[in-house]
Structures are given as structure tokens and as C-alpha cells.
């Protein structure tokens, strides 16, 4: 397809999957359970953190996370006592276990108590055109408390060439405000034009078949290559095309 034909095709597919029915089969339903800003962002961050593997299992374990937080994530994070974390030890989602979950709650308390919350902690500087350094700095901040080294793998770092799929997906949820009610768009101090496509196996394979991604590895260099094309198609809202790439891959086996 020529550039204009390809853009038109992706616009149609983005509109097809960027609709409210998408929520029922996606982990984004976890933050959609809440109305308080801090509950939404904490629920979203935790759900995105475990968003790899079987989608039904991601949703099931995301719901269990919220149950363990008393379905009041912000209040739990701020006011929990040590004994309140005892039930976390039995939690496991693939390689994310109860010890990891416990540290995440402790770190989130530090972020909300001492660093202005997740919105402030992940905001790029005004001079930065993307989230690369913001995510890197956030990881350093997130792990400033004593922790097990193994837990660090659950927050990726684009400066180490990670595609950072899960945190980019979380950022899409929080920053991008669409007209169909899927992405929540509650972080008004952030700009959607700086967002990155949450690159995974599905979106990467589709992008290569469409010839808008040449790099074979799904890493940060591939993210930047794909972004450069998607931002030409829509400089204001480039990550809306994530719905097209993901939908084509998961639902249409493109």
C-alpha cells in the first residue's frame, strides 16, 4: 500500500477497535472500575505491570490484586500496616510474586507521600519530546527503597534498549483521552503526542507485514522506528494506531 492508503487503512482499523467493547477483553478494565484519580492510576499501573501472557489470566489476577487492596488502592497504599501485606505472599502472576507485589505497594506509598504521585513521577520535562528519560528516571525513583534485585525486572528501562511495552501501555491509558471512553486520559499535565506505541509480538509482527517497521527485534530502537512513522500519520495522537496494530494481530491474525 502507498502511504496515504496505509494511513487510511490504519485509521479505519484504529476506529474499529478503539471502542467501548474493547474494554471487556482488555486489562484496561481494571482501572475502569474506579472513579477516583489516584485509584485509577494505581490500579492501572499494577494491571499494566502484570500485562503479559494470557489476557484472561492477566484480568483475573488484576482483579485479585484489587481485592487484596480492599478495592480501594490509594487508601490502602497510603495507610496499610505491615500485617496488611501478609496476604500478598500467596500472589503470583508468572514471575511477578508476592514479594514483588509487596515492594510495589511500599514504593507507591513513597511516591505518593514524597514525590507527588505517579503523574508527577512519570512526567517528561517540557524540553523532552518523548518518555525515554522520564521512564528511566521513574525506574530509579521507584527503586530508591531497599528491595530485592529481582524485583527490578518488573519495571523496564528504555535506556537499556527495552521496548518498555507495559509502561508505555500504562502511559497510553493515563494520558490519551479518546472520544469512545477506552483510554482514560486523566493526566492532563502530560501530552499524548509524546506517547509511544506499546510494542509487543502482535503489534510488531503486524507493523513488519505492513512495512512500517524494519527492525526485527522488539526493542526501544524498534519503538522509535515505528513511532517515527505513526507520528507522521498523526502528530497529535500517534498511539491511537496501537489499536489498529494490536487488533489486526490479536483478533484478525493478520
Image: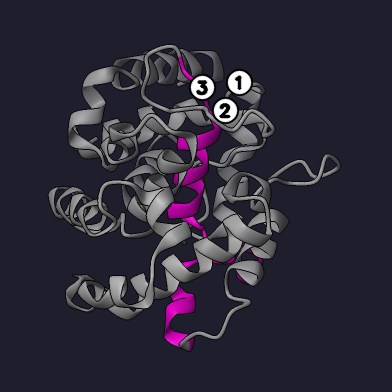
- Where residue 106 is drawn, which disc sits there? none
From the viewer's perspective, is the residue at label 1 or at label 3 nearer?
3
First along the sequence among labels 1 and 3: 3
In this image, 129 relative to 121: left or right?
right
Q: Is residue 115 above or below residue 131?
A: below
Q: CA–CA distance between discs 3 and 2?
A: 12 Å
Q: Was residue 79 drawn as part of the magenta stretch in this picture?
A: no
The residue carrying pointer 1 sits among few (fewer than 14), some (14 to 19) or many (20 or more) residues within 10 Å by Cα, namely: some
> Would you call the spot at circle 2 few (<14 residues within 10 Å), some (14-19), or many (20 or more)?
many
- Mark 1 in CB contact with mark 2 (< 8 angstroms): yes
| Image: magenta residue range | 149-178
Of helix, strand and loop, which mostly describes the magenta segment? helix
Confirm whether residue 97 shows in the render: no
Q: 212 or 161: which is nearer to us?
A: 161
Task: From the image, tell me which residue sits under label 3.
Answer: 177
Counting labels gives 3
* Residue 88 drawn at (x, y percent): 25, 72
Amino acid at each position: 500500500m502507498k502511504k496515504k492508503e496505509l494511513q487510511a487503512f490504519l485509521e479505519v482499523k484504529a476506529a474499529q477497535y478503539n471502542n467501548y467493547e474493547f474494554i471487556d477483553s482488555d486489562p484496561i478494565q481494571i482501572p475502569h472500575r474506579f472513579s477516583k484519580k489516584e485509584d485509577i492510576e494505581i490500579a492501572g499501573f499494577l494491571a499494566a505491570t502484570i500485562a503479559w501472557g494470557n489476557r484472561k489470566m492477566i484480568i483475573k489476577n488484576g482483579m485479585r490484586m484489587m481485592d487484596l487492596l480492599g478495592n480501594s488502592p490509594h487508601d490502602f497504599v497510603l495507610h496499610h500496616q505491615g500485617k496488611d501485606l501478609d496476604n500478598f505472599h500467596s500472589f503470583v502472576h508468572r514471575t511477578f510474586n508476592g514479594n514483588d507485589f509487596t515492594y510495589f505497594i511500599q514504593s507507591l506509598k513513597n511516591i505518593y507521600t514524597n514525590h507527588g504521585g505517579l503523574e508527577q513521577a512519570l512526567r517528561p520535562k517540557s524540553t523532552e519530546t518523548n518518555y525515554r528519560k522520564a521512564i528511566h528516571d521513574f525506574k530509579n525513583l521507584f527503586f530508591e527503597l531497599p528491595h530485592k534485585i529481582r524485583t527490578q525486572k518488573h519495571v523496564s528501562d528504555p535506556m537499556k534498549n527495552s521496548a518498555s511495552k507495559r509502561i508505555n501501555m500504562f502511559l497510553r491509558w493515563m494520558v490519551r483521552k479518546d472520544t469512545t471512553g477506552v483510554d482514560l486520559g486523566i493526566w492532563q499535565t502530560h501530552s499524548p503526542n509524546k506517547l509511544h506505541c506499546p510494542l509487543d509480538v502482535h503489534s510488531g509482527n503486524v507493523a513488519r507485514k505492513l512495512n512500517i517497521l524494519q527492525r526485527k527485534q522488539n526493542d526501544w530502537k524498534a519503538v522509535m522506528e515505528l513511532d517515527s512513522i505513526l507520528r507522521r500519520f498523526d502528530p497529535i495522537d500517534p498511539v491511537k494506531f496501537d489499536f489498529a496494530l494490536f487488533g489486526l494481530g490479536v483478533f484478525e491474525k493478520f
